[in-house]
Image (cartoon, rainbow, N blue to C red):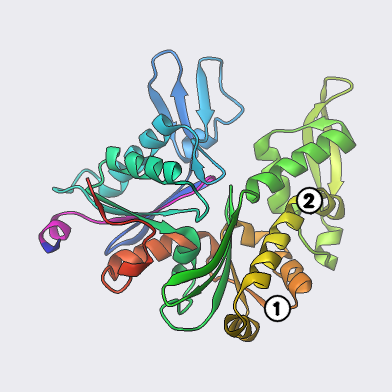
Amino acid sequence: MGLFSRFSRDIGIDLGTANTLAYVSGKGIVLQEPSVVAVDQVTKQTLAVGADAKMMLGRTPGNVTAIRPLRDGVIADFEKAELMLQHFIRRVHGGKSLVSPRVVVGIPSGVTGVERRAVMEAASQAGAREVHLLDEPVAAAIGAGLPVDEPTGNMIIDIGGGTTEVAVMSLQGSVISESVRVAGDELTESIAQYMKKVHNLVIGERTAEDIKIRIGSAYPTNDNDDANMEVRGLHLLSGLPRTVLVKGPEIRESMTEPLSSIVEAVKRTLERMPPELAADIVDRGIMLAGGGALLKGLDKLISHETGIVVHIASDPLCCVVMGTGLVLENFQQFSRVFSNPTTVL
């Protein structure tokens, strides 16, 4: 592999429902883009990928569709996912590599064999020489700096756009893991449903996400309770555009159901772990990673419900891709972490 790696730059990819990030060996994180593709339905031509395509969501004419090819952490539209991966791999390589790269892809731990195969095929069709799959909680733990190769318990909660991964790790492997398909997208959707039901206001996905980021919270604090925001949308009764003032506490209330599902997954994992590892977790605390970790007060909510200290990773959005990158840089050291045998294509 030494000869191959001299001419190609290996890539670690966090193929997320909301965002795709890429790490190139020797360079670090070189790409962070929304997982969105815009296609002309008539000519079948790709018009935009990533941030440019996200700007088109909900704003396209009839012949153009802007879609997210991943749902709940897995590929929902194989063709568009392949197009997106090809575009990103070409971009990070700049067309300079002489040999196809080795690619490590972070995927949810709860995906099926068919879904794993779809990711591997999409990566190989996009130009990968060799594809390895790495479970997201393992990648997130490595990227967050947890000592996963030691015989001690490390617990991580990785909340992405489509899935929440809860795992307890020791000696480079998952002792217990649980993957629930409730995460950032469900929190956003619950806000949109609340606005429709309570305020008779129809809003788009981007507006709901903006509300979540600006005034959303998981646990009451003085700062959150004072927050408010003007929301513009289409009024159901009059059919005309309308502006409504919403407050922080009601947005927190709207997200109660998906937040409860996440907390229950954490509790189930804690109940199943061996006593020795439980002692380590109580001592070291729980690490929170992924974009969902940025929701205000989520660490306080989980800590309140479990009685265990919760830490937020220093850069929660980049934990998984950093983990894939560190595995690439130290391939022999982390050879046991992969969830599939080596696949040379």
Left/right of residue 117 with respect to residue 97 in the rendered view? right
Q: What range of the chain is rendered magenta?
A: 3-18
Q: Residue furthest top?
A: 42
- Mark 2, residue position: 257
Specify whether residue 318 is in view. Answer: no
- Mark 1, residue position: 308
Q: Quadrant of residue 172?
A: bottom left
Residue shown at the point (73%, 51%) measured from the top left? 258
Residue 325 higher or lower than 343, as above or below: below
First in sequence: mark 1 or mark 2? 2
Q: Please state which of residues 80 and 108 is positioned toward the viewer in this rendering.
A: 108
Left/right of residue 273 with respect to residue 218 in the rendered view? left
Residue 284 higher or lower than 103, as above or below: below
Q: Secondary structure at mark 2?
A: helix
In which quadrant of the rendered image does the C terminus lie?
Answer: top left
Q: Which mark is residue 266?
A: none
Q: Please state which of residues 53 and 191 is positioned toward the viewer in this rendering.
A: 191
Please name the amino acid that badge 2 sits on: Glu
